[in-house]
Structure formats: C-alpha cells, structure tokens
Amino acid sequence: MTDTLIDRRDLAFQLYEVLDTESLTARERFREHNKGTFDAVLETADRMARDLFANHNRAADQHEPRFEHGAVTMLPEVKRAFDAYAEAGFIAGRYDNELGGMQLPETVMAACNGFFTAANPGTAGYPFLTTAAANLIRVFGSDRQRRTFLPHMLSGRFSGTMALTEPHAGSSLADIRTSASPTGDGHYLIKGAKIYISGGEQAITENIVHMVLARIKGAPAGVRGISLFIVPKFRVDEQGALGERNGVGLAGLIHKLGYRGTTSTALSFGDDGPCHGYLVGEPHQGLKYMFQMMNEARLGVGFGAAVIGYRGYLHSLAYARDRLQGRKPSEKDPESPQVPIIEHADVRRMLLAQKAYCEGGLALCLYGARLVDDQHTHPDPDRRREAGKLLDLLTPIMKAWPSEYGPKANDLAIQVCGGAGYTREYPVEQCWRDNRLNPIHEGTNGIQALDLLGRKVWQDQGHGLQLLLQAMQRDLEAASSERCQPWALSLSETLQQAVRVTQSLGQALMSGNPDRPLANAACYLHLFGHIAVAWMWLRQANAAVAGLDTATDDGERHFYLGKLQAAQYFFHWELPTVAQDLVLLRNQDDTCLTMRPEWF
Amino acid sequence: MTDTLIDRRDLAFQLYEVLDTESLTARERFREHNKGTFDAVLETADRMARDLFANHNRAADQHEPRFEHGAVTMLPEVKRAFDAYAEAGFIAGRYDNELGGMQLPETVMAACNGFFTAANPGTAGYPFLTTAAANLIRVFGSDRQRRTFLPHMLSGRFSGTMALTEPHAGSSLADIRTSASPTGDGHYLIKGAKIYISGGEQAITENIVHMVLARIKGAPAGVRGISLFIVPKFRVDEQGALGERNGVGLAGLIHKLGYRGTTSTALSFGDDGPCHGYLVGEPHQGLKYMFQMMNEARLGVGFGAAVIGYRGYLHSLAYARDRLQGRKPSEKDPESPQVPIIEHADVRRMLLAQKAYCEGGLALCLYGARLVDDQHTHPDPDRRREAGKLLDLLTPIMKAWPSEYGPKANDLAIQVCGGAGYTREYPVEQCWRDNRLNPIHEGTNGIQALDLLGRKVWQDQGHGLQLLLQAMQRDLEAASSERCQPWALSLSETLQQAVRVTQSLGQALMSGNPDRPLANAACYLHLFGHIAVAWMWLRQANAAVAGLDTATDDGERHFYLGKLQAAQYFFHWELPTVAQDLVLLRNQDDTCLTMRPEWF
C-alpha cells in the first residue's frame, strides 16, 4: 500500500514542463503569486488531504451517514476535514483577495482539489459543492444575496448544494416541476421534490444553502421556463444570523454503491411549512445560469475521475512491486525464487494502461483548467474568447473521457491485485465504486456525446473545432524528435479522418432528421476523446524528450522514459481502437437505431 | 424491476434450436430422459431459484456472514436454499442413478445452475463447491473414500470446498507449502495455511469436506510434488457418523466487494490439534487431478459470469421500458410527453451490447457444456476424443470471455439505470460487484491467456485448433441466408488472419525465448474470444433465420428479429475490434515487455 495520492513529480511535470503554469504569474490577477506560492499551496493540499481526508476514507465508506431521530449522523472526521479545508481558504481559493480568497489560478486549484478527491471523494464533495453553489451566487446573485450568503459559505459556516434533479426529471431538466409562487415579500414559495441531492443534509455546517431550479407559475414549458432560487435550510438575516427553519425537509437518504461519505438525499420543499426561495438573477434564466457554470462543474467531474483512477493505479503499482508470484515463461526452474508480479508482461500491460489513462486524463483536465484561466485572465481578449470556445468544445470530452477511463483504470487495479483487490481489506475496490458515479452525474456520458456531436462541434460555425485543430497542429509540428514523429504522424492521420467524418455527419444533420446521424454519438465522443488524450500524450512526450536531454540523474531519466513508454502505449494500444468508431460513424450504422423495443 | 432470471424462450432456443439438446436422449446414458424431463427439471430450477435463492440475494449481500464467538453466523435462508437444492437432487444431478443422481446431461445441469447463479451467486456457491469436491472423490478417491463421503455430500449433509490457494501461492500453485506427513495409521498430518477458501466455514451443514493440496515431506519441488487430500472438519466413520473435531480451524473471514453470501475464509491446518488428511489417489498427482476437473470448473465460472450479466441485462431492460425521460433529437416540442428511455438510440446501444455479450456468452458456455457431454457420452469414440480436445482448447476462452464481458454488461446495466443504477435500491450494482470476482478466480484471465497461447493451441500438434476451424467451417457454410452471408464472410476473413498470426507466434515460440511472443497473450485471448463468440452469434443467426421462416405469430417473429439484430450488433460493433489485437500480435509489440519497473 502507498499513501501517495498523486505523484508530485508527475504533477510538477504537467504543471510546469507541459503547461508552463509559472507563466500565469505574469498576469495581473496572479501577480502576487510565484512558483513558490503555487508549490506551497499544493504542498498544503497534499498534506492536508493525506492527514485529514485520507485518514477516514475507508471508515466513511463503511459507516455511511445515517438518518436517525430526525437528524443525519456521520463520522466527526468529516466535519473536521471540511472545517480545515475552509480554514485553509480552499473554498474561496479562486476568489478575489477582497472576498477572502487567494486569487489562485484554476490550474492550481484544480490540482489542489485533485489531492482531496484522491484522498476521499466522499468528504471532498461537501466543500466542492459549497464552492459551486457560492459561484452561482457570486456571479448571478444580487448584492444583498452576495452579502448575506457568500461570506458564510466561503468561511465554511454554511455549505451549499445544487438541487436540480427530480424523480421524473434527471437527464431531462426541461421537465422539472418544482414550482415557485411569488409573494409580496420579496421571496417566492417553493413547492416540490428533489432527489439525488448531494449534501442535501449533513452534520457539518450550521446552515445549508440549496441552489434550486424551479418554475415560476405561468412560466413557459421546457428549458426557457426554469428559474434559479436560493433556498436556505435556515432563513438568515443580512448579517448571516440564523432565523426560522425554512420549509425544506429531508425525505430520506439514498444508499449508493460508492461515494458513500457524501449524503445523497431526497428533499421536499414546502411540505413541512412554507419554503422561502429567493430568485437569483432574472426569471426563467435559471438553466442558462447553471449551464454557464457547467464547464467548470463537468471539468471537475472529469478531474475527479482521473485522480480516483490515479490513486488506484498507485495502489496497484505498489502491490505489483511487492507481491511475489510466479516466474517468467522463460524460467523453467521451479526452485527459482518467485518474482514480483511487476515482472510479468501482462501485469505491466495493466499498469501501463492505468498510467496511460490516468496521467492522460489528468493532463487533459489540467489543460482544461488552463483554458478556464485563459478564458478569464489572458491579457489578449481574442485569446480569452478563443479559450472559452475551446473549453466549450472540450467540456463533454473532459467530463466523459476520464469518467470512462478512470473507472477502467480502477478495474485494472483490482485485477492487478487479484484476490486481494477483490477484498475490502484493499482500497482499490472502493476506488472503483466511488469512481463509478462519474459517468452518471453532471450529465451522463450519453448526454455528453449528444452535447458534443449535436451542439458543440457546430457552435460558432465550428470555430471551436478549428481552434482545436490549430492547437493540435502546433504540437504536431513540435514533435520533431525521432521518438515522437511516428506518433505525431498517426495522430495527424487520425485527425484528418475524424475531420472528414465530422463533415459528413454535419451534412447529414443539416439535411434532415437528426436521429440517425446522432444515433452513434457515443462513438464520436470516444473518437474525439481518444484523439484529445493522444494529443495530451504527444505533448507530454515532447516535454519528456526535452527533459531527457537535460536530465542529470537516473531518477529523472527513468521518469521521462516512463512517460515516453506510456505515450507509446497510448499510440500503439489505444489510439488505433478508434478505427472502429470511424467505420461506424462513416456508415451511420443504424443497428442501434433500428432495433425495435419489442425485439428485445 | 423483473424477477426473470434467464429468458426461458432464449434458453429453449439455445438448447433446442441451436444445440439440438434433444438428440442427447438417444444416447444410452440419457435414455430415460426426453424433452419433457429436461423441461421439467429446468422449470424446477427456475422456480426454486426464484423462490428460495433470489428471495434473499440482496439480504445476504447486506448481512454478510459473521464470525462471532467462535462460530460463523449467516441468514437462515441460505441453509434453507442449500437444503432444498440438495433435496431436489441437484448436487447429484449429473451422477449415476445408482449414486442417487439424475443422469442429466451437463448441458441441462449447466442451464439449471444458471438459474441459481443468476438468482443468488453467493448462496449457489455452497452446493456448487460441494458438487466439485464430490467429483474429485468420485473420480480419484478410493472405494472407501467414496463410500465414506460421497453419499453425505450428495445428500447435502456435508458440503465441500477446494482448498488450493495459500497466502504466498495463488496463481502460482507450484509454490504451495502446506505439508503432509505420513503416519502409520493410514492418514497424513496436514500442517499449513490456506486463504480465500470459499465456503471454508458456514452455518449450513453438519460437516465440511475440504479438498486440500499439500506437499508430502520430501516431494519434488514445483507442480510435480503436490498431492491431494481429503480433510474433513469432523472426522467420520465409514457410516458417515461424525467423530472428533479435526484440526482445521477458521483463522478469519475475508470481506469482499461482492459474492458476500459465500464465506471467503482463511483456514489453518494443524494449529488447533492434529489435522488428519486422507490422500486421494497417488502421491504427487494432486495438481494433475485438479486440472482434470478444471475444464468444468472454469466453464462454470464463465457460465456464472454470463448469467449474472444476463440478470443485470434483464433488469436494465425492464427499467428502460418503464422509465420516461427526454425526447428524441427530432422532437422539438418541449410539451410533448417524455418517452421511455428504450427509445433513445444510445440506450438501445447499451441494451444491445448487453444482449450480445450475455446471450453470446451463454451460447458459448452451453456449447462448452455440450462438449462435456460429447466427451463423455458420444457414441463414437473419435468424437468423444475430439470433443475433449475442443473443450481443452476452448476452456480458457469460455472462462475468460464471459468473465470479461459479463461484468461489462453489468456496467452498462448500471449506466442504463443512471442514478438509480448507482443506488443500492436497484439490483444492478450488486450484479456488477458479484460478477467482478469471475475474471479473478479459477485462474485469472491473465493466466487463461497464457494457458491458451502458451499451451492449449499447440497441444497435440494443434489438433484442437484444427478441430475448431472445422467446426466453424461447418457453420460458415450453413450461413447461406442473405442476412447471414456477410457475417460469415467477415468471420471467415478474421479467422484466416488469426490463423496466420497463430503460425507466426508459433514460429517465434519454437525459435527461442517465449517471453516476447507470450507478452501480449491477453490480445490473443481477446482475439480468439471474439472469434468464438462471433461464431456463436452466427450459429444463433442461422437458427433464427430458420425460425423466422416458420414463425407463426408476432412474438416469435420479434424474438428471431431480436436475435438477428444482436448478431448484427456483434458483427458490426464487436468483431472488428480485433483488428487492433491482430496488429499488436503480428508486430509482437514489445511496449509492455520492455517497460522497466523503475520507469513507472
């Protein structure tokens, strides 16, 4: 076993050698930072995650929150961890100094949060949701709402939730029914039921601020009739003092496969007394507001999936180095000593696949975080707009690819550990169970596929896609080393085919019924996901070749050689699997579309 | 939700339309059977599995066995189910009438056991292990051992276990250390420790008969020095009356991700008083005996994986028919009603994939069971030998393919059910957890890959492979319908490439160090697994085309059309994925082999 959460050498490589994160300190917003402050905050996150989050990851899974005598009980360690996270300023890590924030770049905050998720995704859920809810209030709330709620959320006195899903409306938010009736007193009365609300009740904070989607009576049907409300558990005055209990109640806890430390709740609004809600921004704009925050939320899911995968990879790697079992095929002497299983080619395959998935997924999400930074802080307004478009395009990929391949990595980690991996005495099975949520929440991967092929690719006349091709082109041209050239060639060829198939799908979409061209959207998502991650591996390989040139000790050389071998794995073993996607997309294969329900 | 375990129409199709199981009744051994008796026993198994096994599947997962005050406690329903299974004669289902058996063909018994595993794999484990242990005694035991133990095991008074694994010897059984010292009294004294022994302690039967691998003092190193012993929990006289407690003790229960109803135990031998063991057969032949039973054991694992996959598929199918969510891309009216999610192409993809995996896996394992029958009961001795060779060759595939794709199906079932699938209120997450054991036990899939490419393919100068090609050739020629012809062509082409790559690997294996040609054995296993399952789908498609010709009602027509669509799914979406395996094998890609441990 190992207590390493994310390999710090790898993280430094990705942040500084691949992404040049240090260059951000030249920007106005980050001018008080330097590599030293970034590293200090990363070190704090890593240490705190190991000491206060990882310490109860297993216990919080085994003793999940309970709803007893009208209250939720949970391990006291969860509150301790939450409070320490808030105290260290992480809830407000990205915020302005004047709001009590640290003005950290998204790239650095995402990496910090990576440690917490890797350590204990269940406990990390509470502060992450609080940041997400606070963001909505910060950007779209009134001055009064900001004054009333933000300081207490950022300090960790209040937590936040996102209350979207209803029993009959999950993927299809257009169909939510929770209603909001205006009163003369500046608030609305909320009535309805929500389900799967993470952190909807807990034993951590004095108050919980629910960000609730509801329909104002008489609103238009569908997505254009949904508004956003603040619904606190306890009403508060402008100084944040708690007032009466608001009419939002816990209908029950939902018991999950994993992520058990985060309560998943069914909430009722207006059943136990009047439920006051405060409209955020304009009426009927709620879903638009949510979606403006969606890139970051979905990127967060992808990031979490990559690092839970990463954590399982490190566990299985440590196991494979320790565990003696069997001999190489060429060793015929039964009295020869058994070898560590890392010596077996098939175990190396499973480790290399995990490395390729997790470090590739991490690179992709850190690249996404950098786009968030560029979108908000790049000195050149054109580059800011471009970063936003690239981010829009890549968001479904950055959510879905790691959430597909992170659990795959965890599955391989179980297999590497064999019988031990199947027991609850080893941590890899929990990694898999926790990670399995990620392809489902924040828009299932099926929804991401439709978002990519049905919308994002064509947005702004395909400008995002052009920008992506240009960005890749720069890295293809930089791949001039002998080691990287064949990989660049294979990526470039795959890309050309992907562009051609995109054009043919575009024509089909324009010329009629979208059902058939969209039927195999999952293949398109897989195709572009693999292209994006191959690109990330090419970028890492380029940086590794440069690093090798100047490496002065064996440890460094081994690190870079490992990167190159993982890149090779991705280019030999993974990228070619898209051939199948290309065929199915080219043919607009209709096997799934024409399968009739009564034939099952 | 649905309480269907395995679709009976599908099972009848596979047994009678694809396999012609009825023809077995012409054989001497099965002459007292007819289609009516087969169907009656299948009906009994199905009903009993639903009433007595499925009823506590969830509860046995939630309340796993505990070790308290020196004894194991478990739900009383487990014993009730075990006793009913024994009472109905299923432990001895395959045995001679004179031993109290039913002389059922393996094909029918495998199908019966499919219902029990689909209903509750944890509880089904106990009787299955008892049959397996009894088989060893029946085939290799002395008359006295048979008299002493068999009747009580077949009646369910005693249970059985297979005690192979030790803490430092799992995949590598050659390295076991448990020792056996001869005494003058006809027994050996056993000393050592075993781990992961399923059913090693329980609260079901009066006695437990452990089949233990151990080394007689002075035995040669490696696989040639391992002997097989009967080690009962209580010593017994020849009438089966219980005597003294034998020195085998429960060192602890192991807590697993799934399969929680079956205890997984650490056992100590000789620590709590003398542990008597009775040598089975000749000294040093223990591993050989075990391996003679291995085909059936591994086939059983594959079968179990296929049917747990199948059960999850049926759950997710029922959910997809019921759950209303969203609209088709072509439907723009937000006030139109939501559709059942089975209407979404991507959901159909996930259902079709499950259907293709589970019905394909089931077909493969039923074919394997038929080979067992042919090996033992075919009137033509040549055909008996041929069936045995085919079975030897296909065993690693029949173990590994379903155990890879059954859990994949369960993963898709979770995804189809979305947030609900992630909760423990729905059964699909348990299916996945239970099924995840199957790629690990009875030889990990990595071991199966080495067994296939390192041994089975070359056995008897490749005679098994020739027989396989001939068997496939017959079905390729039978695929004369318009629907099946293109599939036959694509299978035939893939097969030719697979044969070529087999030849080149064979040359590499003969000409030197085996480490490189065996390094990508996993790809070879995947390649041949997909070919075998494509073949199964071609056989099913051939039968479906014939069925369609004579179908007289819509239900029947829909059934056959579903089969053809699933076959199309396999040929369009799955078989082509082996292109990647072929490339890696052809190149003897050395990415994994050359990755050095210190580069990770």
Image (cartoon, coloured by chain):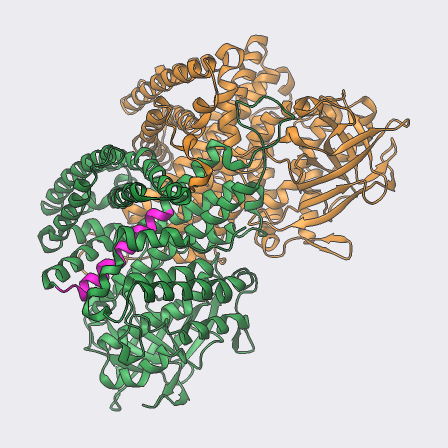
Chain colours: A orange, B green
Residue B1 percent across, percent down from the top left: 54, 50
Tell me where residue B569 sits by quadrant: top left
Judge by depth and name the residue closer to the eye, A182 or A308.
A182
Q: Is residue B429 above or below residue A195?
A: below
Location of residue B595 in the rendering, given as x and y in whole percent from the top left corner? 30, 39
Q: Quadrant of the C terminus of chain B?
A: top left
| Residue under the point 76% across and 21% down | A283
Q: Start and end of the magenta stretch?
A: B358-379
Left-right relation of A380 to A92 = left
Rendered image quadrant of residue B222: bottom left
Residue B266 vertical position relative to residue A536 in the rendered view, above or below: below
Q: Please give the name of the residue rendered at 31% of the width and 31% of the height, measured from the top-left corner.
A: A568
- Which secondary structure is most common in the magenta stretch? helix
Say whether residue A348 is magenta.
no
Q: Nearer the viewer, residue A338 or B575?
A: B575
Q: Is residue B373 magenta?
A: yes
